[in-house]
Image (tube, rainbow, N blue to C red):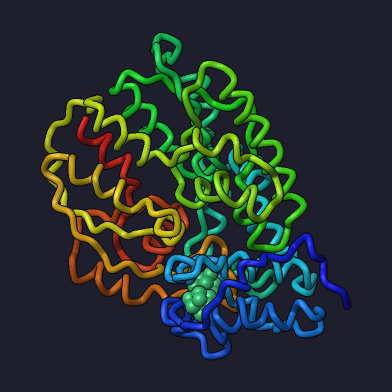
Amino acid sequence: MSVNLALLDTSFDMCIKCTVCTTKCPVAEVQPDYPGPKQSGPDGERWRIKGEGFYDESLKYCTNCKRCEVACPSGVEIGSIIQKAKVRSGRHKPKIRDYILSHTDLMGAVATPVAPVVNMVTKVKPVRKLMDKVLDIDERPALPTYSWQTFRQWFKKDAPDQTGFKRQITFYHGCYINSNDTTVGKDLVKVLNAMNIGVQLLKKEKCCGVPLIANGFMDKAQSNAKLNTEQFREALEGDSECVISTSSSCSMTIRDEYHKLLEVDNRELVDRIFFFNTFLVKEFEQGNLPEMKPVKIKIAYHSPCHLIRVGGIVFTLEILRRIPGVELHMLDQRCCGQAGTYGFKKENYETSQEIGAPIFDQINKINPDFVVTDCEACKMQVESSTDYKVLHPLSVLARAL
Ligand code: SF4
Ligand code: SF4
């Protein structure tokens, strides 16, 4: 079988075979059937380029956490090489389960009008057993709950009037904030308004595409990327200073993966698309710091893999350190194991829990009032695997206002 050259990432050629990436792969650490990033990424690609007959089934274990890319001294985009190889091979035909887990906009539209019923039903043990048996969605992890009022509905009806602010930014809320937990979106509005900045929403937006990419729906991910990029362009041509996202995975995807992985050229826009933390730290440094009162809480901060990938942890820590009264404990920079939809799948649940176990143990030892992280998937995993509630850094900041 020949190779689709459009889906080749030639950065494999820069590999110097140092093996550092393999020492940092959370999956290779616990899953003996996974040979690790060096072998699955650049080494395997040298074979796969000869023909897709050299494809290795173990690539399915990669979570695309990108920890290997952070470790690589040669700039090999190992996670992307593996994702593209999976797509080229066409062997991982998505199941109904993968469709349900990855089409988050559709699931949100169906579930939010009847959220209390959906939230109740998905907690019922026989229902979970049935989902486990029929759909291969593991019965053990807690599934995301839905909000009866979407963030967009709240923003339209109940958000404070934003038109009075001289400065305006556009908020890309993503599917989780819109349909599952609207808190972080409301807190962003509260924080930015306290800094005299108004918030606008895009006329329309779609899921960033990260669960679609992970589950093999590349065409749908690409069409979402095209729509979102058009919307970003329109907003930035208007009176918006920039586009802000509050989810670390959405942020990495809409800035970097659109042009690297999905071939949607957004490069002229990326300097004006920010993760909330870089935007806030820049404002703080220019003297635009909201007035804060002490928040007496002990928090344990968990670093999401995709925020580590873009070098963004330092900015979140800078925000948390500026909130008076907060007792901040840093958790080791390890993957929590959830990796978006990976930990919900029956075949991955044990691996996902084994990856996250050291983090769960450390949280239990610290015994914080809250765990804090910038990623909704990490939040779901920690809340499902420990007794602790997880807050977004913006929600800690909003408590201080
Ligand atoms: S992306 Fe993550 S899981 Fe995949 S090879 Fe790299 S470190 Fe391992
Ligand atoms: S860390 Fe980079 S250079 Fe070293 S083996 Fe892995 S891919 Fe190759």
Q: Is residue 211 above or below residue 289?
A: below
Where is residue 37 drawn, in percent x and y? 54, 78
Q: Quadrant of the C terminus?
A: top left
The answer to whether residue 77 is visible is: yes
Name the quadrant containing residue 106: top right
Where is residue 305 drawn, in percent x and y? 43, 62
**Residue at the (52%, 59%) spot, across then down:** 143
Name the quadrant containing residue 23: bottom left
Whether residue 93 sits left or right of residue 353 in the image: it is right
- What residue occupies the far bottom of the structure in this picture? 32
The answer to whether residue 349 is visible is: no
- Given residues 17 and 393, the one toward you in this image is 17
Whether residue 239 sits left or right of residue 94 in the image: it is left
- Given residues 14 and 117, the one toward you in this image is 14
Name the quadrant containing residue 225: top right
Q: Is residue 132 above or below residue 208?
A: below
Q: Is residue 64 above or below residue 91?
A: above
Where is residue 82 drawn, in percent x and y? 64, 71
Where is residue 215 drawn, in percent x and y? 67, 63
Whether residue 177 sits left or right of residue 313 in the image: it is right
